[in-house]
Amino acid sequence: MKTVLYYFSGTGNSLWAARMLARELPDAEIAPMPAPGLETVSVDAPVIGLVFPVYIWGLPARVRHFADKLKGNGSPYIFAIATNGGQVANTLVQLQQLMARNGRELASGFDLVMPSNYIPWGSPGPRRVWEPRCSAALEKLSRIAGIVRSQEKRPVEKGPLWHRVVFTLLYKLSHNQIPKMDKSFWVDEKCNSCGICVKICPSKNITMSDTKPVWNHGCEQCLACIQWCPRLAIQFGKKTPRYERYHHPEITLRDMIGK
């Protein structure tokens, strides 16, 4: 039975999760979630998976758009995996409610803890610190594969009650401000104008001006630009110059930009 896994990924965690899951599902393929702008997203596969990160304790704008525009024939088994640094909060409930408004059922939803990549709040630390999270995630993905193969319906996973209350409020207050949060990006003297940040930005939000990147206030806060910069020249705020960068070690720059 064909399965299509749609992913959105900035630093590789969600792409890796989609790949690992696809290995355990028969006739599975993966595809990136399209950028906003489409009137409808037509998917006719009998099993559909959405794999994406949690942004500011909720759904990324791209995932909201994709779920809102998702159309197709029949009643597919739809599930979701929300990768996060330890706080899934109410994200999967948000997705479930959004899909229900459009007459779609989210049959199951899973919280997948991965190394944190939100560098404005710090580094995930050295590999020996975060690697156990990847190992635990791989084990959980194997369990998820079994649930998906049997098309079992389960309540979506969610964080503690106070996470769902407090963090959902913060999400609602902040998510409309995300596109302009790119005003905190800047480049230091290590920048050599390679343009990788332009290529890897999923929102096409970065352009080059006088050989330096410029952010144009359409940011999704995926942080691909800062995490994939080969010279560690991109910064966010005042603290990131001293933080280690992170992207999933099994995902390459070629994987991310498709070249």
Image (cartoon, rainbow, N blue to C red):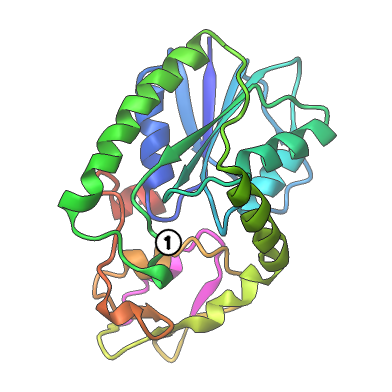
Q: Residue flagged by tag 1: what amino acid is it?
A: Ile
Q: How many numbered discs sit on the rendered protein?
A: 1
The residue identified by callout 1 is 200
For the question of whether residue 69 can be seen, the reply is: no
Q: Which residue occupies the extreme front position in the image?
A: 162
Q: Is residue 182 left or right of residue 124?
A: right
Asked whether the viewer can see residue 257, the reply is: yes
Q: Quadrant of residue 180?
A: bottom right
Residue shown at 44% from the left, 55% from the top = 10
5 versus 203 height, above or below = above
Q: Is residue 21 above or below residue 191?
A: above
Where residue 172 sits in the image (x, y, percent)? 72, 60
Q: Residue at x 57, y 59 (%)?
A: 56
Residue at image location 62% in from the left, 19% down from the top: 45
Q: Is residue 51 magenta?
A: no
Element assignment for label 1? helix
Examine the rendered structure and indicate whether residue 7 appears above or below residue 248.
above
**Would residue 170 be found to the left or right of residue 1 on screen?**
right
Q: Quadrant of residue 156 in the image?
A: top right
Which span of residues is magenta-colored? 193-207
Residue 75 image point, x, y percent: 73, 16
* Residue closest to the eye, 4 or 150: 150
Q: Residue furthest left?
A: 128
In the rendered image, residue 130, in percent from the top left (x then y), is placed at 25, 49
Residue 195 part of the magenta-drawn span: yes
Q: Which residue is nearer to you in this view: 117 or 122? A: 122
Residue 102 lies, in percent from the top left, at: 82, 34
Horizontal arrangement in the rendering, residue 190 relative to residue 90 (left or right):
left
